[in-house]
Image (cartoon, rainbow, N blue to C red):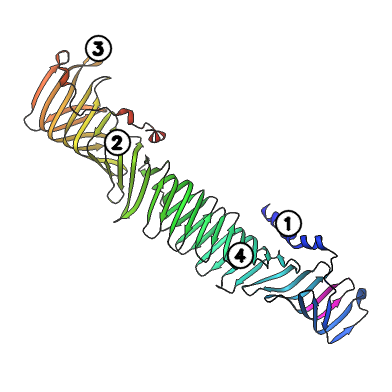
């Protein structure tokens, strides 16, 4: 359908002026020279042979032989040439010229040259009054400025604007780039291309795919206004609109932005994004979301702004302000988070909190070591605190200066707590097939080991001499049931991917 519309547009460009001005006087076709001049030819035509030259309005025409008709039509044969103005030249084997409409139909080894380019095509319609040309049997344009070559099946040319409209199988070859598209507008004097359909631009290690926009082939600056992606050095920047500068390697994107590794293991979504080829840094903001493949699962993370930059043997992702993440077995929140794929390490700072099953862990900083896409080890430094619900109202609590956790499968299996370690641990017993809390163990110890099972605390082992008291639940002092610093932050916990955007 697009191809048909393009042909109609080209036909309109060629014939619009001719139809509106048909019959207008540009003077009669003037014969300047002929070696032989015969009258009374077919249909009353004058026959001219040898070094034939015509003049009509501002155009000069040459050929080996010609027929000149009374109605100002000319059929010219062999070595046909048309000169118009200071620079426009056309050459062909055959010319059929309508002097009233000033339409030239050239065929056979047609060449059109304006000083900046040469068009080669089997046939060409040229409107000398409007200075517009069109072809529909394939064309090849060679630029005199940079030796670039453009081919297409159909095309139209406006000589005054030095602008082309190309259609169907358009390919622009340049020493530095290759452009493939279906429809393109190109101005030879400026080197600016405009695309109206799916387009691929290959330029060194950079691959651009766009549905529409402008590209300055000389400066390397692009303004794409429809869905566009830029692939460079294994990174993809994609957006509904995109600006790209080849010289400084900077790209800016707006609307449904994606920045991703070509491997697909990591990608970032957002409303606005920026990427620099020179230092391989990127930034995304506005509903920013990181997707990180972790084995068969995916971690979804949100922060007001996400940054990525290279480091030794990998990349580092930094999320700032309002950070929340969700994975089926692990959720968290903090103000600043970094992820390093070189050492598979997540670092959480500024009020970090982590949830694994029913367990909540907080501290000044939290580090999570990943292995095979799963949480493998946990390090909490400064004011380390574990909360786990013993029942709907009571909390098991463990706190200390530092905490080291060990995961088995997707669950926290063991915690080693050191430095001023304290615990509140509720013990249970079975009564009539139901567990009931009957006592609370309140203990202080320099080192504590906590075993986890089925999402709760299974046992607490005091590794040094503890100061411990076991209170029957009915007689336990209230001040012994809640340690200083205990804070249930469950309201901050994201429970789904969508939940990471809810503060």
| Residue tagged 4 | 187
Q: Nearer the viewer, mark 2 or mark 1?
A: 1
Q: Give the crowd class for mark 4: few <14, some 14-19, many >=20 residues within 10 Å.
A: some
Disc with the residue nearer the chain's start (2 vs 3): 2
Residue bounds of the magenta highlight: 65-77
Picture coordinates of residue 167 (x, y %)? 65, 60
What is the spatial separation of the Cα atoms under label 2 and label 1, in whole angstroms? 64 Å
| Residue tagged 3 | 432
Q: Secondary structure at mark 3?
A: loop
From this view, report whether residue 155 is shown above or below residue 375. Answer: below
Disc with the residue nearer the chain's start (4 vs 2): 4
Tag shown at residue 8: 1
Report the residue at 64% width, 61% height from top: 166
Disc with the residue nearer the chain's start (3 vs 4): 4
Report the residue at 32% width, 43% height from top: 373
Q: Give the crowd class for mark 2: few <14, some 14-19, many >=20 residues within 10 Å.
A: some
| Residue tagged 2 | 410
Report the residue at 51% width, 65% height from top: 177
């Amino acid at each position: 359908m697009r191809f048909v519309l393009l042909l109609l547009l080209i036909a309109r460009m060629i014939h619009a002026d001719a139809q509106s001005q048909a019959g207008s006087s540009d003077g009669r076709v003037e014969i300047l020279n002929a070696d032989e001049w015969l009258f009374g030819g077919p249909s009353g035509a004058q026959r001219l042979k040898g070094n034939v030259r015509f003049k009509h309005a501002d155009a000069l025409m040459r050929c080996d032989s010609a027929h000149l008709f009374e109605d100002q039509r000319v059929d010219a044969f062999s070595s046909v040439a048309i000169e118009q103005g200071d620079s426009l030249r056309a050459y062909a084997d055959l010319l059929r010229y309508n002097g009233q409409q000033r339409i030239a139909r050239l065929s056979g080894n047609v060449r059109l040259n304006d000083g900046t380019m040469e068009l080669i095509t089997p046939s060409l319609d040229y409107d000398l009054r409007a200075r517009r040309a069109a072809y529909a049997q394939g064309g090849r344009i060679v630029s005199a400025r940079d030796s670039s070559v453009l081919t297409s099946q159909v095309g139209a040319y406006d000589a005054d604007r030095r602008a082309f409209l190309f259609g169907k199988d358009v390919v622009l070859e340049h020493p530095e780039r290759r452009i493939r598209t279906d429809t393109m507008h190109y101005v030879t004097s400026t080197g600016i291309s405009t695309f109206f359909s799916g387009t691929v631009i290959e330029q060194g290690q950079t691959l651009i795919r766009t549905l529409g926009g402008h590209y300055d082939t000389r400066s390397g600056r692009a303004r794409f206004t429809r869905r566009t992606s830029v692939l460079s050095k294994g990174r993809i920047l994609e957006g509904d609109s995109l600006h790209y500068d080849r010289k400084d390697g900077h790209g800016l994107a707006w609307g449904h932005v994606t920045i991703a590794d070509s491997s697909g293991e990591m990608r970032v979504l957002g409303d606005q994004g920026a990427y620099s080829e020179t230092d391989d840094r990127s930034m995304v903001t506005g509903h920013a979301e990181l997707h990180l493949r972790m084995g068969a699962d995916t971690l979804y993370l949100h922060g007001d702004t996400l940054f990525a930059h290279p480091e030794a043997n990998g990349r580092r992702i930094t999320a700032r302000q309002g950070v929340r993440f969700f994975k089926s077995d692990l959720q968290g929140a903090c103000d600043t988070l970094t992820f390093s794929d070189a050492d598979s390490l997540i670092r959480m700072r500024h009020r970090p909190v982590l949830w694994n099953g029913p367990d909540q862990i907080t501290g000044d900083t939290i580090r999570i070591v990943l292995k095979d896409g799963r949480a493998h080890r946990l390090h909490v430094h400064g004011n380390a605190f574990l909360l786990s619900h013993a029942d709907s109202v009571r909390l098991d609590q463990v706190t200390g200066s530092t905490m080291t956790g060990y995961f088995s499968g997707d669950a926290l299996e063991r915690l080693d707590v050191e430095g001023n370690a304290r615990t509140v641990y509720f013990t249970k017993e079975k009564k009539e097939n139901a567990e009931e809390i009957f006592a609370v163990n309140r203990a202080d110890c320099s080192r504590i080991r906590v075993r986890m099972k089925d999402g709760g605390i299974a046992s607490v082992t005091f590794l040094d001499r503890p100061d411990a008291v076991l209170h029957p639940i009915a007689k336990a002092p209230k001040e012994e049931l809640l340690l200083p610093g205990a804070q249930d932050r469950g309201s901050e916990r994201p429970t789904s991917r969508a939940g990471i955007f809810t503060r």
